Image: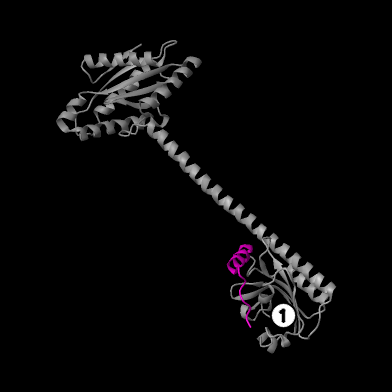
Amino acid sequence: MPAPLPADEEARQATLDAYRILDTGREAIYDDLVAIAAAICDVPMAVISLIDRDRQWFKAAHGVDGDSTSREVAFCAHAILNPSETMIVTDASRDPRFSLNPLVTDTPRVRFYAGAPMRATNGQPMGTVCVLDDRPRELAPQQRTALEALSRQASRLMELHRVSWELRHQLEERGWYEQQLLHYQRELEQQNSDLEAQSLTDPLTGLANRRAFSRTLDQAITQAHALGEPLSVAIVDIDHFKSINDLHGHAEGDRVLQSLGEMLLSAEAARGRLARFGGEEFVWLLPGRALDQAVRESEHLREAVAAMPTGLPVTISIGVAALERDEDASSLLARADQALYTAKREGRDRVCALP
């Protein structure tokens, strides 16, 4: 007759599942245990059997074909009902629990059975280390002691398997989380980098903004003073820009700003020395250029802007100033702005310079 389920079967099954031993491959260390059990007990068959939901599965088997049977015919399903005791059946053909069992009436015609339950660390029975014979017999006390010792050894091996699996899983999970953390960290760094770039870039023209230019200018001035090298600054203003907005609309004004930005980028943007200062005003840092060279380059820029194919008459005025000894950024920019004011006052579409 089939064995009844243990009172705490759900917990027992959960414990067995947690060991993750079911349906694992054959392992020599378990095969050795059943071979030793068969030899010590002087029987032809020995099994490490785990009682699953609807089957008994053999982690190792000696002298037994197959790797499982149904739970209904499993002797071990009876053995786990009293996990603190080794179950011994001296003659199954005379035991009412097993006399009609197909394992008794048919191959392998079991008569003798002894099963020592294997218990998890929480006390739940998972299965047995059992020995079987096709002849009725008794189990000597020393054989029983040895079988129980082998059962404890099998339990410890499965506990080691469980712990090893959990450690591997934790390491894999940790590796996955570390990869995710690295991924998110890189994304955050990229976002921060993008935000930093956005905070330093004029969105309309793609040029550096005033904040970015101020940093660059301060660094360039410090270097120029330290090395005794020339440095100039040019402030560029689009002439009559308000009229462009008023007559043609702000969209057309933005297009003019973008066209000028593209021209400036083609000249210097790779070195980050140009910026939109605000409105229609741009600033150009010219390191290594004395005043006369800066003026020449500014004239070339003025001519290029006048020739831009914008569909509108666009001209610029430029004020240029060269760095003086011990001068700071605010003073240099103020003098360039004063030069720009002179260019505007003198009729626009020209370059004016202050030494």
* Residue plotted at (32% across, 20% down): 235
Q: Position of residue 142 (x, y in %)?
A: 85, 72
* Residue plotted at (72% across, 88% down): 93
* Residue plotted at (59% across, 54% down): 172
* Res 206 quadrant in image: top left
Q: Quadrant of the C terminus?
A: top left
Residue at the far left in the pictured view:
247
Q: Position of residue 301 (x, y in %)?
A: 31, 25
Q: Position of residue 180 (x, y in %)?
A: 51, 48
Q: Quadrant of the N terminus?
A: bottom right
The crowding category of the residue bearing disc 1, from other C-alpha atoms within 10 Å (few below 14, some 14 to 19, many at least 20), is some
**What are the residue bounds of the magenta stretch?**
1-19
- Position of residue 311 in the picture relative to residue 74 (left or right): left
- Position of residue 139 in the picture relative to residue 19 (left or right): right
Q: Is residue 238 above or below residue 106?
A: above
Q: Nearer the viewer, residue 259 or 212?
A: 212
Mark 1 element type: loop
Residue to which mark 1 is pinned: 64
